[in-house]
Amino acid sequence: MRAEIVRVGSSLFSRGLAHSTAGNISVRLDAAQGGGFLITPTDACLGHLDPDELAWVGEDGQQRAGARASKTLALHRRIYEAAPHARSVLHTHSTHLVALSLQGVWQAQDILPPITPYQVMKVGHVPHLAYRAPGDAAVADELGALIRRAERPLHAAMLERLGPVVWHHSPAQAMALLEELEETARLWLLCSPRPAPLDDTRIDELRQRFNALW
């Protein structure tokens, strides 16, 4: 699992989806793996992670081993508490998504309208959380509450001026979701005039045929 976190971090960094020391990755461990979480260290570069320095943190948030855990640990823990299906959480400052947040998102409940089928199928709704300083525990509490009361399962949220946070069954699946979300933001920003959203009939078809998240 340490090697997989390093692989995903390197892939994100090499393709420009993560930069400098921005971003973090975590994985929830099962009992056979020792329990708790693995998370990237604070101010670590995702492109140059050392597997031995990944922070191992208990369910209670107490650090067991490794370098000091990311300052967004509280956010990761709240997501795991609120979304039992989540096994990996990934946060980056991806360029087009941050640009979208700076320019103005579609609406607070959904940063983008449903414009592509794979966005509807793989990403689903993405709420926008108002700006707070990096690592602020209030953001973690707000997102946890949003996940719990959502009508359809959430897999992503956007932190104003900071970037997306996504969660899924594995680091690879979380990375794929992030890629789809970033590409959708890029398409939206490139289009002038803006494309019309998919209508309810087409969205319902994607739900029926592909169990779309939207």
Image (cartoon, rainbow, N blue to C red):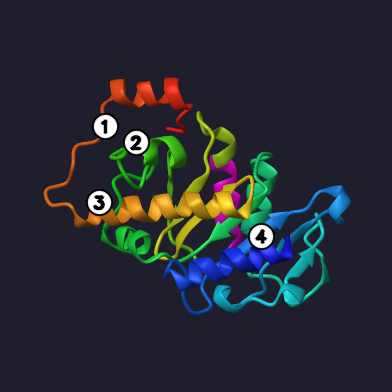
Nearer-the-camera pick, 95 or 51: 51
The amino acid pointed to by label 4 is Ser
Q: Quadrant of residue 52?
A: bottom right
Reading the image, the residue beneath label 3 is 188
102 or 131: nearer the eye?
102
| Residue under numbered circle 1 | 198
Judge depth for marks 2 and 3 and give the one in front: 2
Q: Is residue 113 visible?
A: yes
Q: What residue is pinned by disc 2?
A: 117
Amino acid at pointer 1: Leu
Q: What element carries label 1?
A: loop
Q: In the image, which residues are magenta?
A: 134-146
Q: Distance between the residues labelled 1 and 2?
A: 8 Å
Q: Residue placed at 45% from the left, 42% from the top?
A: 123
Q: Is residue 14 left or right of residue 49?
A: left
Residue 155 placement (x, y as % from top left): 53, 43
**Local SS, label 3:** helix
Give the Cα separation between the discs numbered 3 and 1: 13 Å
Picture coordinates of residue 55, whole percent (x, y) = 75, 70
Q: Relative to 96, say whether 193 is above or below.
A: above
Is 84 in front, or is 175? 175
Distance CA(mark 4)–CA(mark 2)? 28 Å
Which label's residue is closer to the chain start, 4 or 2? Answer: 4
Q: Is mark 2 on a helix, strand or loop?
A: helix
Q: How far apart are marks 2 and 3 (CA)?
A: 14 Å
* Amino acid under disc 2: Pro
Q: Which residue is drawn at 46% across and 40% down?
A: 122
